[in-house]
Image (spheres, rainbow, N blue to C red):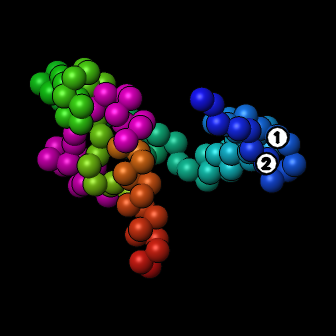
Amino acid sequence: MSRPPHLCSCGLIVAHGARCVCQRTATRERNARHDQRRPSARERGYDAKWERERTAFLTFHSTCRHCNVRPATIVHHIIAHRGDRSLFWNRSNWMPVCQPCHDGPIQRQERARERARRNRA
């Protein structure tokens, strides 16, 4: 049984589980503003040295530590380094994960922690 459509704040009727055009546009604009303020990947430390270390790390840690099923393709920083170079290069802070786990449950957990951190401040 499917759920009924809902009414968006802009007044359009949207199918259940779908996002309205106005919501998609707002998200795209918000992400573009964020990207303009954000330093480039190279400026954040993801350079040729990182690529070499990442490749070596994934060679020895080839399975996703989160699901233990898929091959790891990303080296995730367990504690966000936020520009701290010593934390960035600390291998005990690295975790091999697959793309689906990184983009799904791990990112949701990080966003929840970040919201909780902001609410405490």
Please name whichever residue, 18 or 116, is drawn nearer the observer in this view of the structure: 18
Numbered label attached to residue 13: 1
The quadrant of the image that shows the N terminus is top right
Seen at 35% across and 43% down, the residue is: 106
Report the side of 91 relative to 115 (left or right): left
Seen at 62% across and 51% down, the residue is: 34
**Is 14 one of the magenta-colored residues?**
no
Please name whichever residue, 72 or 21, is drawn nearer the observer in this view of the structure: 21
Helix, strand or loop for disc 2: loop
Q: Residue furthest front?
A: 1
Seen at 22% across and 42% down, the residue is: 94
Numbered label attached to residue 8: 2
Type of the residue with mark 1: Ile
Judged by its main secondary structure, the magenta piece is helix
Asked whether the residues under the numbered discs 2 and 1 touch, taking CB atoms below 8 Å apart as contact, a structural biologist would say yes
- Range of residues picked out in magenta: 84-105
Residue 83 falls in image quadrant: bottom left
